Amino acid sequence: MRLTDRGLNRMPRPLARTLRKHRELVKFAIVGGFCYAVTLVVNYGLRLTVLERKPVTALIIANVVASVVSYFLNREWSFRTRGGRRRHHEMLLYLLINGAGVAVNAAPLFVARYVFGLQHPAVSGLAEEVSDFAFGMVLGTALAMLFRLWAYRTWVFPHDDVRPAPDRSEVHAQTAPASPLATDSPGA
């Protein structure tokens, strides 16, 4: 039994039924949570070291790193039964959408700092950090997540049930996993 099934079996039936019904959205949210943690670590790692005076640049770099991680997790887990495009076309669309997602994510922080002036010396260091976190890491991430979910379903992985999930016996029978870039998905 899969770990996710064991977890769902421990939940109240109505909640488990709802989560199973919206499995793709739940998986997308889990990948998003993981990538949010990646973004936090990279963002603050950069802000506390080499990009101390450039918070928007640090956030953009952090989002690019998290977007690369997100592609592989979403492609192989969240949207693994969706597709309909060749891998190179799918990857190009994913990169374009994530470029737009990075801009959506950075926009609230940019507006807070450079339009509303929520930066030192106009505000205290604490107010600046709270503003940066609220506008960049919370509001920006939420807006970008909604945009990406819609765009992935609409353009990157447009067709459902194109790539059936592998049978567990087939997965165990394989001796070496195939490279995700070696094959194209059908129906392009």
Image (cartoon, rainbow, N blue to C red):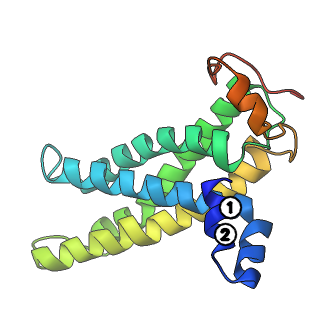
Q: In this view, does 106 lie to the left or right of 170?
A: left
Q: Are marks 1 and 2 in contact (CB under 8 Å)?
A: yes
Location of residue 87 by image quarter: top right
Q: Residue at x 68, y 53 (%)?
A: 1
Give x and y (percent) for residue 142. 51, 68
Q: Which residue is drawn at 13% across and 70% down?
A: 120
How many residues crowd around disc 2 within 10 Å: few (fewer than 14), some, or many (20 or more)? some
> Image quadrant for the C terminus?
top right
Which residue carries the number 2 mark?
8
Amino acid carrying label 1: it is: Asp
Give x and y (percent) for residue 64. 43, 42
Of 38 and 121, which appears nearest the observer? 38
Give x and y (percent) for residue 19. 71, 71
Q: Which residue is drawn at 76% across and 45% down?
A: 155
Q: Is residue 110 left or right of residue 32?
A: left
Of 96 and 184, which appears nearest the observer? 184
Q: Above or below — where is 64 with respect to 35?
A: above
Amino acid carrying label 2: it is: Leu
Q: Is mark 1 on a helix, strand or loop?
A: helix
Which residue carries the number 1 mark?
5
Q: Is residue 93 visible?
A: yes
Q: In this view, does 27 lie to the left or right of 86?
A: left
